Amino acid sequence: MSKQGTAPPEPQDFERVLSSMCTVPHPAAREAAERFLATNPGDPTTYQTVAELEREAVATLGEMTGLPDPEGYVASGGTEANLQAVRAARNLAASDDPNVVAPESVHFSFQKAADVLGVELRLAPTDDRRADPAAMADLADEDTALVVAVAGTTEYGRVDPVPALAEVAEDADALLHVDAAWGGFVLPFTDRDWHFGHAAVDTMTVDPHKMGRAVIPAGGFLARDERVLDALAVDTPYLESTSQATLTGTRSGAGVASAQAAMAELWPAGYRETYERAQANAEWVADALETRGYEVVDPVLPLVAVDVPRATVEALRDRGWRVSPTSAGELRVVCMPHVTREMLSAFVDDLDSV
């Protein structure tokens, strides 16, 4: 608690944040969040206005991901949505010992989900940092409940071959989940095949509080079929509503309202502009680093991984740059909406000087 007369602490600014997948909220999202701070979408019959905003947000997420009649809700983030995908698959599985097959590039939230839900997580080696359908098929069997694809990996921004992984899931009689937590707001403006309209995808994670510019927390969990939500539902005897499919009970009305407001303001033209600027920035910094002799992973999406010595990374951190590595040690530059060309130029200048 602050002592009387002292100023409250200020949050981290974004002037030198280069590895985060969160960003500055859109002004409309910030304003909406403040108006709905005291609302709870977990009790939709009491908080009817925010419940309607959630339906609008889910509908827009469905439009963005090729699903005309989406089921789902605004979650706390990608971890919750990924856990819910595993939980639904486990609950729908015929096997008493279900497993989940995913590429080794999958987000660490699946480790948490497997631990919490008591399912086996099988990780297949990747091919050029993307899921290898043959390796995934080798791990799938009659107990496989879920096959996972990633559309925009957190370390390299890679997009897995979703249609081929849909075939792996079909052969195993399993559900297919696509984790597009970060990539979902940029992939609509590419020629990649990644969503419900491109393949037999059953569930998807897509987060408005990342490239969507909503406030935190505002994730997204989408399902093609109502049976997925039914598999998650529990009775709610003391609420006006009779059942609840979400993982948490009380939820953030601020997150829901901000997600709806951001998407109403930016989808699709604003997000297209954001993607094109971010991709151009990623390609610019990749070229600048490659010109200086660094080994750079080609930016498929607005994320650059570059092989920079650990001592250099520490020196950059000492100068205030907020940067983090991949598991293999490369430095990550994530070109979020707050990242400008001027920021990247200053970063490259500091890299030169250290």
Image (spheres, rainbow, N blue to C red):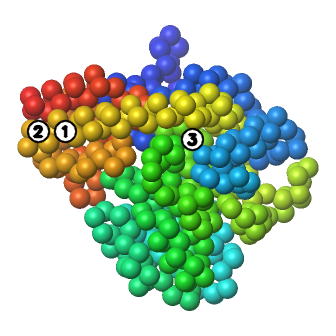
Asked if one can make out residue 324 in the rendered structure from this viewpoint, the answer is no
Res. 88 visible in picture? yes
Distance between the Cα atoms at labels 1 and 3?
29 Å
Dot in front, 3 or 2: 2
Q: Which residue is mark 2?
A: 291
Packing grade of label 2 (10 A; few <14, some 14-19, many >=20) is few
Please name which of the two marks, 1 or 3, marks the residue nearer to the observer: 1
The answer to whether 331 appears left or right of 262 in the picture is left
Q: Is residue 54 left or right of residue 165?
A: right
**What amino acid is found at the position of numbered circle 1 in the picture?**
Asp
The residue that disc 3 covers is: 208
Check whether the beta carbons of the residues at disc 1 and disc 2 lie within 8 A of each other: yes
Going by the numbered disc 2, the residue's amino acid type is Thr
Query: Is residue 328 shown above or below 137?
Result: above
| Residue 66 spot, x, y in % from top left | 62, 53
Q: Quadrant of residue 128?
A: bottom left
Tag shown at residue 287:
1
Where residue 186 sits: x, y (%)?
47, 43
The CA span between labels 1 and 2 is 6 Å
- In the displayed structure, 235 sits above or below 63; it is below
Callout 1 crowding tier (Cα within 10 Å): few <14, some 14–19, many ≥20: some
Pick whichever of labels 3 and 2 is earlier in the sequence: 3
25 or 324, which is in the foreground? 25
CB contact under 8 Å: marks 3 and 2? no
Q: Is residue 20 left or right of residue 5?
A: left
